[in-house]
Image (cartoon, rainbow, N blue to C red):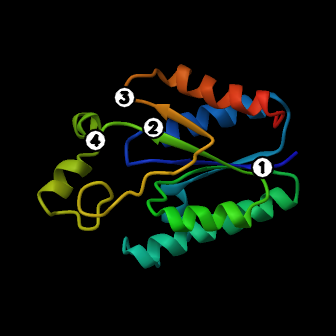
Amino acid sequence: MSFTLWFTGLSGAGKSSISSRVYEEIVKCNLAVELLDGDIIRNNFAQDLTFSKEHRDINVKRVGFVSKLLNKHGVISIVAMISPYAEVREQNRQLIEDYIEVFVDCHLDVLKKRDPKGLYRKAEKGIIKNFTGISDPYELPVKPERVVHTDHESLEESVAIVMDYLKKNTYI
């Protein structure tokens, strides 16, 4: 059974870390799976896009379409992207037959303290424009299938929450 597991949340919340570990767990099950990380996608397939709302929407739609194609061919798609706008996430939910949304929640104060790349500091100083959570909005998911709270859960706990959902709902 193929499906798309879509991780959404603010920059630095843990989408890439959790999705990478979930990917590894699914590989161990001998299932066809692909990981589409937002940073890698942007660097390789979306250099033509800015961080405007219109271009962010285009990027999320592109990845949604690729996920649908992967699913069509029996490949599980794991996506880790900020995906800040609810309307486009909902469009992907309608496009993709088995769409599972995971909201990677982390309090903004914790993200600002973590800030390994210094992005939040730069955004607050106005050096980075259109930064989600600071100068651009992030619309909270309304009905994600799962929420993980990385400000008070370990990586292992967050991965277990996602894997338990997949097992209980017979995705794996």
The residue pinned by badge 2 equals 14
The residue pinned by badge 3 equals 151
Question: What quarter of the picture does the N terminus occupy?
Answer: top right
Q: How far apart, in angstroms, are the residues tagged by discs 1 and 3?
A: 27 Å
> Circle 4: is it few (<14), some (14-19), or many (20+) Cα within 10 Å?
some
Q: Is residue 169 left or right of residue 54?
A: right
Q: Which amino acid does label 1 sit on?
A: Phe
Q: Earlier in the sequence, mark 3 or mark 2?
A: 2
The residue sitting at 23% across, 40% down in the picture is 112
Q: How far apart, in angstroms, are the residues tagged by discs 2 and 4?
A: 13 Å
The residue pinned by badge 1 equals 3
**Circles 3 and 4 in contact, beta carbons < 8 Å:** no
Q: Can residue 36 be seen at all in this image of the molecule?
A: yes
> Circle 3: is it few (<14), some (14-19), or many (20+) Cα within 10 Å?
some
Q: Earlier in the sequence, mark 3 or mark 4?
A: 4
**Circles 2 and 1 in contact, beta carbons < 8 Å:** no
Q: How far apart, in angstroms, are the residues tagged by discs 1 and 4?
A: 30 Å
Q: What residue type is labelled 2?
A: Gly
Question: What quarter of the picture does the C terminus occupy?
Answer: top right
The residue sitting at 23% across, 37% down in the picture is 109
> Circle 1: is it few (<14), some (14-19), or many (20+) Cα within 10 Å?
many
Give residue 79's mark. none
Q: Earlier in the sequence, mark 2 or mark 1?
A: 1
Viewer-nearest of discs 2 and 1: 1
Q: Where is residue 7 in the image (x, y as percent from the top left)?
A: 56, 46
Q: Can residue 46 be seen at all in this image of the molecule?
A: no
The residue pinned by badge 4 equals 108
The residue sitting at 46% across, 63% down in the picture is 85
**Circles 1 and 4 in contact, beta carbons < 8 Å:** no
Q: Position of residue 12 (x, y in %)?
A: 37, 42
Give the structural element (helix, strand or loop) at label 4.
helix
Q: Which of marks 1 and 4 is nearer the N terminus?
A: 1
